[in-house]
Image: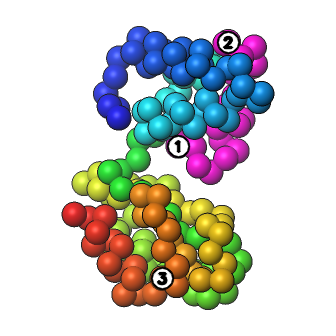
Amino acid sequence: MNIHLARADVTERTLKIVGELKELEGPLLPILHEIQEEFGYVPEECLPVIARELNLSRAEVYGVVTFYHDFRNHPAGRHVLKLCRAEACQSMGGDRLAERAKALLGIDFHETTPDGAVTLEPVYCLGLCSCSPSAMLDGEVHGRVDDVGLDALVAEARR
């Protein structure tokens, strides 16, 4: 992932992704996921290209990008720490854990540490309700996260 790309490169790569996936039924979400995989986020300059190629309005594409929490409109840190904010995790100390993570990292949700190491994001269910509270670091889920476990995840992300 190279976040310092020329506008022409972003457009070219976007056209390639759209071309590969536009024949799918309901191609918008797979295209957006692939673009985020390619760039690390969904660059704003991709939206009109996607809209034109799928015969959608820019507002429709923008609405989907902003509706789903998984899509970012800015580059993430080298590591992404997601904390579950769903009810089961909240009932098992998720709120306190979230506040601890914010204090340890010195950032709020949807922010990245100044050194670019960690982005902190809320997620609304990781499917580990019976192992609450849960977290995900770089796609790997962790259940029954307590203070010690959170400290270890933050330390791992800071490396």
Residue 155 position in % (x across, y down): 27, 72
Residue type, label 2: Arg
Say above or below: 84 vs 90. above
Q: Which residue is mark 2?
A: 52
Q: Which residue is mark 1?
A: 72
Residue 97 position in % (x across, y down): 49, 81
Residue found 48% across the figure and 74% down from its top: 142
Q: Is residue 155 left or right of residue 122?
A: left
Q: Is residue 92 left or right of residue 146?
A: right
Front-most of residues 55 and 60: 55
Residues shaded magenta? 52-73
Front-most of residues 16 and 4: 16
Say above or below: 98 vs 73. below
Quadrant in the picture for the C terminus: bottom left
Residue 102 position in % (x across, y down): 42, 71
In the drawing, what numbered circle is on residue 145?
3
Quadrant in the picture for the N terminus: top left
Residue type, label 1: Arg
- Circle 3 SS class: loop
Residue 3 position in % (x across, y down): 34, 32
Instruction: Return the disc, 1 or 2, that comes first in the chain's sequence.
Output: 2
- Circle 2 SS class: helix
